[in-house]
DNA sequence: TAGATTGTTAATCGATTAACAATC
DNA sequence: TAGATTGTTAATCGATTAACAATC
């Protein structure tokens, strides 16, 4: 599929475009230009065309793009035409919120299980989802065919949990713990740092003063 | 303070370094080299030195950096030596989880108030924090001296909430809604997209197959 | 045909990496 | 002095922007 290396920034923007197009589609608009997409999401029109060009030719010169068609292509490129089962380890505040976050479901991610090692939490329900013993992880990964695991545990046990996830067969990890995880090359990982965004704001607020 | 333009990627890494140093400091280690920091957080040693060089000279040639000292400098640079009051609008799953997220408090962010417009939510308590009517926002921003607001509402009302935040006097916005917000130039904003990280994993998992 | 907009190439810009003199 | 490591400059790499031929 991918001949040349695609910048990660491009993938992020494709996700943004796809959501913007979903919104435009809902309004019943049929055709859109790169310039309109650009204005809608806050990038340049050249950027939009360049990003799309990595994957093919989706538009018509002189006309623009068919909204529904382009949306479909983007969802396909992003791998969002099938549902991804996801498992979460850590049923604290963050893990629980993520488990019930509707935004994931909207984009095709289904929580196949949430796990913890705290006996007081195991067996409790989050809506319809029962918190399971983390020892059940390998079993659930297998039966649900999950590929993606979310690490929502304290930093001290994040590496251990990540190791267990990989042993269980997960191929991708989304790490919410503020700790660098060591993983094999073939596993895909992303680190999400909730605090860092506030810290960047803090930095810029501070810089403004001086 | 800042003579030349500092890459945002540098700020993000400074935040990562600072947290790694906190961990090292707790272990009682006094001196560290750029190479060790680099290995600890997964970047190159040249990158570490370059990032620090934007702000001054913090090390000793032939020796390395004093852990506690460098940690202090980084916290100062990031503006984390004072506590930032933060307000959250939207007391749904995500907003509530963020309000109670301990990771923010650890890094100096204190939730000064959480707001909603749903009468069923107003008056309810999240731990010790009472969910307030969104009409009280301007008042709380003023009395708490908050500068930072977190948008945790559905996309449809995100712009409206952002406008209200800015009218209330907030100078920085952390936007969790998947919608581009229009804000005045002097306001700092960051968009956090929880789904996009899963989508990137989805993309790479898909690309591996072909 | 005239006007509009794509896809793509070349130019620019910015960030990372490599290398090394300075110096502890 | 010898070894280590910083701070900084220059080289490399990669991503964004500008420009325009292709074409609807």
Image (tube, coloured by chain):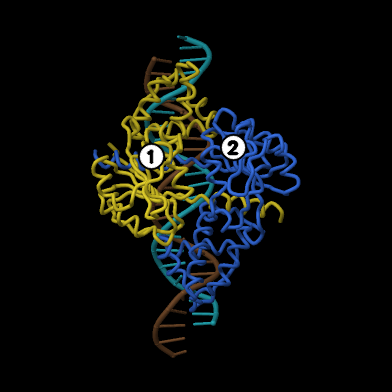
Chain colours: A yellow, B blue, C cyan, D brown
Residue located 61% across and 43% down the image = B125
Location of mark 1 (residue):
A129
Kindly indicate whether the residues beneath marks 2 and 1 are on one polypeptide chain: no
Residue located 36% across and 43% down the image = B201
Q: Is label 2 or label 1 in front?
A: 1
Residue B100: give x, y in percent of width and height: 55, 49
Q: Is residue B86 left or right of residue B38?
A: right
**Residue count near mark 2 (Cα–Cα under 10 Å), binned few <14, some 14–19, many ≥20:** many
Residue B127: give x, y in percent of width and height: 58, 48
Above or below, A183 relative to B114: below
Element class at badge 2: loop
Q: Nearer the viewer, residue B133 or A58?
A: B133
Location of mark 2 (residue):
B90
Give the position of the C terminus of chain A as an image quadrant.
bottom right
Q: Nearer the viewer, residue A104 or C22?
A: A104
Task: Write down the quadrant of residue A8 in the picture.
Answer: top left
Residue located 34% across and 59% down the image = A160
Residue B196: give x, y in percent of width and height: 43, 39
Task: Write down the quadrant of residue B87 in the picture.
Answer: top right
């Amino acid at each position: 599929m991918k001949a040349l290396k695609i910048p990660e920034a491009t993938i992020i923007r494709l996700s943004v475009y796809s959501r913007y197009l979903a919104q435009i589609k809902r309004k019943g608009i049929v055709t859109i230009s790169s310039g309109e997409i650009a204005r809608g999401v806050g990038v340049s029109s050249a950027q939009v065309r360049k990003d799309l060009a990595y994957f093919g030719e989706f538009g018509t010169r002189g006309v623009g793009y068919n909204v529904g068609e382009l949306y479909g292509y983007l969802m396909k490129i992003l791998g969002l035409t099938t549902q991804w089962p996801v498992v979460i380890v850590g049923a604290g505040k963050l893990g629980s919120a993520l488990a019930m976050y509707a935004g994931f479901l909207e984009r095709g991610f289904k929580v196949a299980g949430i796990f913890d090692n705290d006996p007081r939490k195991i067996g409790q329900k989050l809506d319809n989802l029962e918190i399971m013993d983390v020892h059940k992880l390998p079993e659930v990964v297998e039966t649900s065919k999950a590929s993606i695991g979310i690490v929502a545990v304290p930093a001290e046990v994040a590496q251990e949990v990540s190791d267990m996830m990989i042993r269980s067969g997960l191929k991708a990890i989304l790490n919410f713990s503020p700790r660098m995880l060591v993983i094999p090359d073939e596993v895909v990982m992303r680190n999400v740092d909730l605090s860092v965004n506030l810290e960047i704001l803090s930095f810029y607020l501070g810089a403004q003063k001086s």
